[in-house]
Image: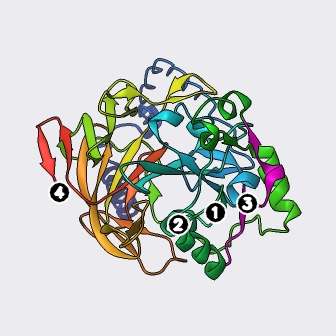
Amino acid sequence: MRIKYILAILMLCILSITGCKGKDIETMAPILPVETPLPSPSPTAPPEPTPEPGPDLTGKRPSALTGEWIDEEIAARRPVAVVINNRLIALPQSGISQAGAIYEVLSEGDITRLVAVFDNFDSQKIGPVRSTRDYFIDFALDHDALFVHHGGSETGYAALRRLNIDRIDGMTDARAFWRDQKRANSPGMYEHSSYTGMEILLEEFERKNARTDKYEDFTTGWAFYPIEALPLGGMPATKITVPFSRNYTAVSRYDPEEKIYYKCIGFAQEPQIDEETGEQLKVTNVLVQHAKMHVIAGDTEGRRNVTTVGQGDGYLFTGGECVPVTWKKESQQSPTRWYDEQGNLLRLNIGKTWICVHQGEITFEGEEQVIE
């Protein structure tokens, strides 16, 4: 009896632990895992679109003049600055639509001359080429450029010698120039008939053993936005008028579709044409550099001194807008540096630039502004 009682107690303990509460262990249903339903398949995502292939930039880098991608070899080469006649009687000019930057400034009397700076060019007719002034050389030095001219003033020649400029002069390097016979044989046009071209210029500089590669540490005095950066938040400016003298005015008209300025010349605002292409000159940026100038005392031709070394203010016109800028040039050999209102190195929109070096007031339309 005692043994049976003990066995009964043990059985009750086992049943209590297993939770069977008196049920037969062998008849207990097994515990099965709960099945989790699988998620329904999501619809197939559309394939990513294949991006359009960009331009192949292998062996290229941005031009220091325009910001456009050009061959690395050309970008490393010194540009060429050519003094171009800008008298109305001498128009149209040839080859200057290929210049990346063009400086316009009074020379003598009421007329301006141009210093056209080329890097990526192949024009075989550039001109008419005219004589230099000392301050023209400063524009070439702004870009470490080789210099091309036909004659020069006394101060111009003195500056060429003092600064030891690599140059080609139509007075002494005749094989790099030729005369347009139609002009040369027309009354009053002989002085407007001197021309040159890319190949003969580069060959002549090589013959002279001129340095043809830029200094590695040389940088131009402006930079470029990597992509279009309009608008700038400036004043509207769709027509720019620079009255260089009583008898001569330069005008730039903005085309909002092309986002460029078309160049016009004279009070009649005639289109300024490149004879080689038959097209009107056009640029992305117009810079106005305010600079002090005066007629040299006793100079019978009315030649000028122009202060390009120092500092001053000016304006940038781009994208149909105008913003104030400043400039600074520490010496003739150093490039002119351009700055925005915050004092940062000035950025331009990619493309060609026209620089008007001017002392007086200019006007621009959009809100009928007159600025000095």
| Disc number placed over residue 182 in the picture, else none | none
Residue 200: x percent and y percent? 81, 47
Question: Marks 1 and 4, Cα distance to the nearest angstrom?
Answer: 31 Å
Could you tell me the amino acid type at mark 2?
Answer: Asp
Could you tell me the amino acid type at mark 3?
Answer: Ile
Foreground mark, 3 or 2?
Answer: 3
State which region is magenta.
164-179
Tell me: residue 69, above or below residue 105. Answer: above
Could you tell me the amino acid type at mark 1?
Answer: Ala
Which one is earlier in the sequence, the residue at label 1 or at label 4? Answer: 1
Residue 45: x percent and y percent? 49, 22
Q: Is residue 106 left or right of residue 242?
A: right
Which one is earlier in the sequence, the residue at label 3 or at label 1? Answer: 1
Name the residue carrying label 2.
142
Q: At x 47% / y 41%, what residue is drawn?
A: 87
Name the quarter where the N terminus is drawn.
bottom left
Name the residue carrying label 1.
145
> Mark 4 falls on what kind of element?
loop
Foreground mark, 4 or 3?
Answer: 3
Name the residue carrying label 3.
168
Classify residue 54 by image quadrant.
top right
Classify residue 85 by image quadrant.
top right
Residue 145: x percent and y percent? 63, 62
Question: Marks 3 and 1, Cα distance to the nearest angstrom?
Answer: 12 Å
Q: At x 80% / y 60%, what residue is drawn?
A: 205
CB-based contact (under 8 Å), mark 2 and mark 1: yes
Q: How is the image coloured?
A: rainbow
Question: Marks 3 and 2, Cα distance to the nearest angstrom?
Answer: 18 Å
Which one is earlier in the sequence, the residue at label 3 or at label 2? Answer: 2
> Mark 2 falls on what kind of element?
loop
